[in-house]
Each structure stands twice: as structure tokens, then as C-alpha cells.
Image (tube, coloured by chain):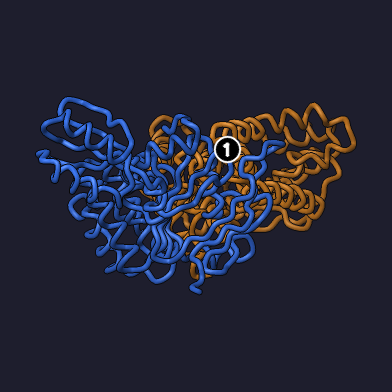
Amino acid sequence: MYKFLRLVQNENMKLFRKTSTLIMILMLIGAIITVGAITKYNGLQEDTDWRQNVKSETVALKQQLSHTHGNAAKALKKQIAVNEYRLAHNIPPLSNRSIWGFTNNATDMMLIITIFTIIIAGGIVSGEFHSGTIKLLLTKPVSRSTVLLSKYVTVLFAGLSFSALSLIGSWLTGGVLFGFTDLDHPALTVLGGKVVEENMLVHVLAVYGLDFVQLIVMATIAFMISSAFRNTSLAIGLTIFAMMGGQLVLQLLARYDWVKYVLFANLDLSGFFGTGQPPVEGLTLGFSITVLLVYYAVFIAIGWVAFTRRDV
Amino acid sequence: MVQPAIQLKNVKKTIGKKTIIHGLTFDIQPGEVFGFLGPNGAGKTTTIRMICGLMKMTEGDIYIFGHSIKTEFKRAIQHLGAIVENPEFYNHLSGYRNLVHTARMVSGVTKERIDEVVRLVGLQHRIHDKVKTYSLGMRQRLGLAQALLHRPKILILDEPTNGLDPAGIIEIRKYIRRLAEKEGLAIIVSSHLLSEIERMCDRIGIIQNGRLIDVQTVNEFVNADAEMTVHFIVDPVDLAIEVLKSTTGQQPARTGDQLQLSLEREAIPGIVEILVNAGIKLYGITTQKKSLEEKFLEVTGGQQIV
């Protein structure tokens, strides 16, 4: 265990002393600050009468509901309930130009963070083969499984660090640009069919957490390809292609019953919470988690077998 | 009997349908420098990779101080320090951080030990520079430092003098001898430079087409032939030819004032006495053994080595 931690320490030293990793961090910070500046100085003026907006939005949603069914209808109903709760309890929607509003919007950074993590996962094993340094790792009294695990843990750690950086960075940016005010503004969400008020921090953490599931799965795919084929470009390219093409594949397969077993139908767990909706009919949270775990186990097994068995 | 440092027992390697290594069996003792020679593609690196656990063998087993590299990998490999093929490092890290990286993977390497090894290979002035700024010779030194860091009992060096200047080569050669003689390390050296092997090694193993065709001590190998070529520088030459012809029954070959004869070592003093008694002035005698290189070409059938 002690040696495992030292290996993780090694992997982190190698990773965070790379120029490319530093560039990723700078890009992430730069993106947050840029979006913040655009929101502050270039955005449209928001209407001051939020009640009127929410009312007209609710009317539009109800109209839409009359010719919608299935999952989409459920999501609409939830949104209507939230809007009505807003009006009844006098809770205005979060402004984009507030600290929590900005922090909430900045959860979109998870797309970039996922791509960065895929890039790291795709290179962390194959890079050692490419440079020949794999010999340094595998001629030491450490099992190959331990070496592989230390790299995997480092990938997830990098993803986690980026996410934390995004959360803290966007909160601070939001605070500096829009003031550290209205900090106890509640988020409204639907829990068990009822609208509830939620702490904004809990809400934002939940968004990051659900997106992190997708990050883990995509990073694991890139990591598996990297270990099995020892080709960085293949690992990164294939994984990002799968991530981008996943929704398209879902649409093409939507008419088949077995679509719910496809990985991409189960990646976005946020549909099961709050006002969202699952992308495919008939999914449950338990089912999606089970499917994800099965895929996950297969990816891990392929990467592990390829790495521990093959000649170097 | 002392336990061998490394024992190869009928090691075979098959890739696809092609057999690359056909059953290697040999031992290397502590304190011994073993030269591993063979033409390109003979299986030297494959064998070294199997000893280091990088490649799995198809059949047979390798024991390091009695521990099988197959079933007791960690216990076997901890005795081993190696540079396999080129010394490769993390170029974006300093030499020092590369050593720290190695130190974290093995047991019992202190900061003092790292400094000690750095001084040993003479890298103390550049150790905090990034490895990408190092010359090949410096990388070799860092490779040696990396391999010695955990005080292994076995050292495996692939082409250790590659890229070093003559002074560096002599230094490394001395150092390898000292490690073997003073600290009792078993050292495997593979090299293209046969003269290097001749100067560094106690025994050599010649491998060709995946088969070990000969294991001998360097002295045995070079001195296997009892006869050697002896050059005599004499005056007058004609008289000397006659005298030599009548005593040895051989027609000496002549180049200028030099005569060459193929003789056994024991016969030389007798010949000298006869020449001197016959009033022939003897200006010099040189003996010429076959070099390892000639022998090597002879044994491997004159194949290209490099």
C-alpha cells in the first residue's frame, strides 16, 4: 500500500510537470474568466420583472405539454411545478450575473474537463511505451497491476482536480465579477414528486458529481485503449469520437428496444434527478447504474489483461 | 557450492510460430562479469528482457538467487538493476527527479544514497538539469546511477559504453570491474565492441540464432589454440631462416627483417637459445594471439556482428 502511494506520487510528478498539463490548467482558468467577462460586459440586459417572465414561460410550457407525452411530458410537468413554486414562494430564478448563477452555469466546463481527462488517460500508459520508459516501471519490484492502478488513480485524480479547480475558480470569478452576495439563494428541484429548496452548493456539487460519472466512463475507455493498443492518438481520438457521436448513435437506434443496453443511453444520470429526463424511455436509475458498472468492468478487464499479460 | 546469481534453465521463447530462443541454460555466479555476445537478431536482447521480466518465456524458467522470475517476480527482481537497450528517461524531468522516481519504486533508498550515486557517476553538476539537455554519455551515466540506486546484487548492462568518450569508457570499465571484484556483483554485459568484452568480462557466452553456442572464460576462449604466431626480428635473416627451418621443420614466413612462425608458447625459449648460439642478432620477439574478434568470427561463421 505504501509503495502504491509512492507510485501515485510518481505519476502525479510526471503528469503535473508536463507542459501540456499546465496548458490545460491555464486553458480551464482562462475559459472561466473569459466566460465571466463576457457575461458581465457583453450580455443582454435582464428584465427586472422576473414574475412576468416565469408566468409567460409557464404558459408556454403548458401549451407544449398538451401535445407531449412520455418522458418529455414528465420533465415539462416538473418544470411547471418548479415555476409555480417560484411564484408562490417569491423565489426569483438565479441571475447569470450572480455568484451562484455563474457558478451553476460554469458546470458546463465539465465537457472541457472530460476531454482533458480523456487526453491524459489516453497518453498515460501508451506514452511510457512510446518513450521506452515503461522498462523503468516494469523492472522494479512492483507488480504490473499496481503500476496500472497507480496510473488509473492518477487519471481520476487529475479529473477530480480539474473539477475542483473549475468549481472553486468559477465561484471566485463569479464573486469578483458579480459580488459575493445572495449566497443563500436556494436552488429549486423536484424530489419525490415535490418541489424542494436546495442549498446552491449542494446543487452545484450534484451537477459536477453526475457529470463526473460520464468523465469516469470516458476516461476509462481512453485508458483501456491506451493500455491495450499502446497508441495515444488512437485512444484519444476514438474516445472523443465516441463521446461526440454517442448521442447520434442513440437517435439512430432509438426505435430498437435494446437501445437501453447501449452505453450512451445510460451515461447521463442527471435525467433521473431534478427537472431532467432520461434520454431513453423506460430507464431507471438502478438499471442505468447496473449497465454502467457492467461496461466499466469490461473496460477495466480488457485494459488490465492487455497490460499485465503482454510482452514489453 | 555458492548459489548462482542467475540461473537460466532451458529458457525458450516462441513468438507466433517462430522460435526465437531455443532452450538457453547457463549460470552466472556472484562476482562474475559475463559478456553476452551475438550477431544482431541472435536473441541477446530477448534473453535480457526475459531475465528482467519484461517478456514472458514460453518454456523453462529463470532464477535470480533461487527466486523464479515467473512466480516470485518481486523477490527476484529486487536484486536486479538494469539498463535494457538505450537508457530511457522522463525527458521533461531533471536527472535528480528521475532518480527520485526510481527510488520510490524500490525499498531503502535514502536521499543520501541518491547523492552518493550521483557523485559516483560524476553527474553532480548537471543532475538538476532536465534530462532532455543531456548528451548520450550523460544519459548512460544516469542509466548506471538508476540501475545501481537500490544496491542490486546483479547488474544488467546493454551496451554500457555506447556514446561514452574514451575516458568515460575506461572509467566505466574500471567501475564495472570494481563492482564485480570488490562488491561481488554479478554483471551481464552485452556489447558490440568485442574488445570491450575482452577487457571487462570473465566469461563470455556466444549466442547465435537463439542458441548458446559456447560459454567459456575469456582466457580459455582466446588462448584455446595452443599455437600462436611469433615474430622474430633478426639479422642476418637468411641464416636465421636456415637455422629455424632445421630446428622446427617449418618454413618461416618473411616480411623484411621479420620472420613469422607458428609456435607453442613452451617452444619459444628453446628457439631463442638456438638463434643466439648460432650468432644471430635478435632484436625483438612479439607474440600474437588471436583476438576475441577473430575467434568470434570463427565461431559464428564470419557473420556480421554489428
> How many discs mark residues in the rendered view?
1
What is the chain identity of the residue bearing mark 1? B
Q: Is residue B1 left or right of residue A234?
A: left
**Relative image position of residue B156 (x, y in whole percent):** 43, 54
Q: Nearer the viewer, residue A278 or B16?
A: B16
Q: Colour of chain A?
A: orange
Q: Is residue B191 left or right of residue A196?
A: left
- Residue with the most extreme bottom position: B1
Q: How crowded is mark 1: few (under 14 residues within 10 Å), some or many (20 or more)?
A: some
Quadrant of the snapshot with the N terminus of chain A: bottom right
Q: Which of A272 and A200 is in front in this view?
A: A272
**Relative image position of residue B115 (x, y in whole percent):** 25, 63
Q: With respect to residue B67, does A264 lie above or below?
A: above
Q: Nearer the viewer, residue B96 or A173?
A: B96
Quadrant of the snapshot with the C terminus of chain A: top right
Q: Is residue A253 left or right of residue B57?
A: right
Q: Can residue A95 be seen in this view?
A: no
The chain letter of the blue chain reads B
Residue displayed at 28% across by 62% down? B178
**Relative image position of residue A308 (x, y in whole percent):** 63, 52
Quadrant of the image occupied by residue B145: bottom left
Q: Mark 1 points at which residue?
A: B209
Q: With respect to residue B190, does B99 lie above or below?
A: below
Q: Can residue B166 be seen in this view?
A: yes
Quadrant of the image occupied by residue A233: top right
Residue displayed at 51% across by 71% down? B3
**Secondary structure of residue under mark 1:** loop
Residue displayed at 22% across by 32% down? B242
Q: Nearer the viewer, residue B232 or B9?
A: B232
**Relative image position of residue B272 (x, y in whole percent):** 19, 46
Q: What residue type is labelled 1?
A: Asn
